[in-house]
Image (cartoon, rainbow, N blue to C red):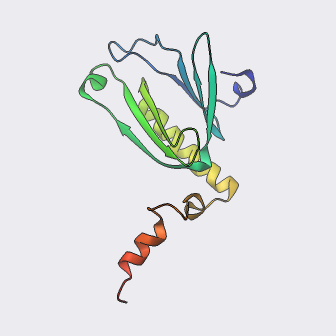
Amino acid sequence: MADEYSGDIIIQERKRWLFFGIPWTFTKFALTPKRIIIEEGLLHSKENEILLYRIIDMELSRTLLQKIFKLGTLIVKSKDASHPILYIKNIKHSREFRNHLADAVEKERLRMRVRQSEIYDPQSEDTPDEHFNDFNDGY
């Protein structure tokens, strides 16, 4: 990871091969108090980030093989332009990473004073107001 983030990292994971959970890939994920940092590549490296307050939802998924090798995949949905859906695949401490991420997202939203309704795009088909109106039709 970049030196500028090294003091702020809450938890760091590395994508692994599914079989045996060997970390022979060149993708790293780091969680800081304000963002998730994704670093990919060896010869041509690319670094991207998602601001935590833009995260909408997260899901932990584990196949049978992932359970055998103690791995998991975290699916993060956000309002980020480059990674609207981020798959953090085959990481060793997937449940711990998810818990740290959930806590950090809540802290960052409180710090930024962001409400959930401010994150949703009003042009989106799935806004909270539409669901609210569906339940209140006829009253």
Residue lying at 24% horizontally and 27% vertically, measured from the top left: 64
Residue 58 at x, y percent in the picture: 44, 44
Residue 72 at x, y percent in the picture: 37, 29
In this view, the residue farthest toward the bottom is 139
In this view, the residue farthest toward the right is 4
Residue lying at 73% horizontally and 21% vertically, measured from the top left: 3
Residue 49 at x, y percent in the picture: 62, 35
Q: Nearer the viewer, residue 107 or 37?
A: 37
Above or below, 48 against 43 in this view is below
Residue lying at 31% horizontally and 24% vertically, measured from the top left: 66
Q: Determine which quarter of the picture holds residue 36.
A: top right
Q: Quadrant of the N terminus?
A: top right
Q: Determine which quarter of the picture holds residue 44.
A: top right
Q: Say left or right for 68 vs 73.
A: left
Residue 135 at x, y percent in the picture: 36, 77
Q: Quadrant of the C terminus?
A: bottom left
Above or below, 69 against 7 in this view is above
In this view, the residue farthest toward the left is 64
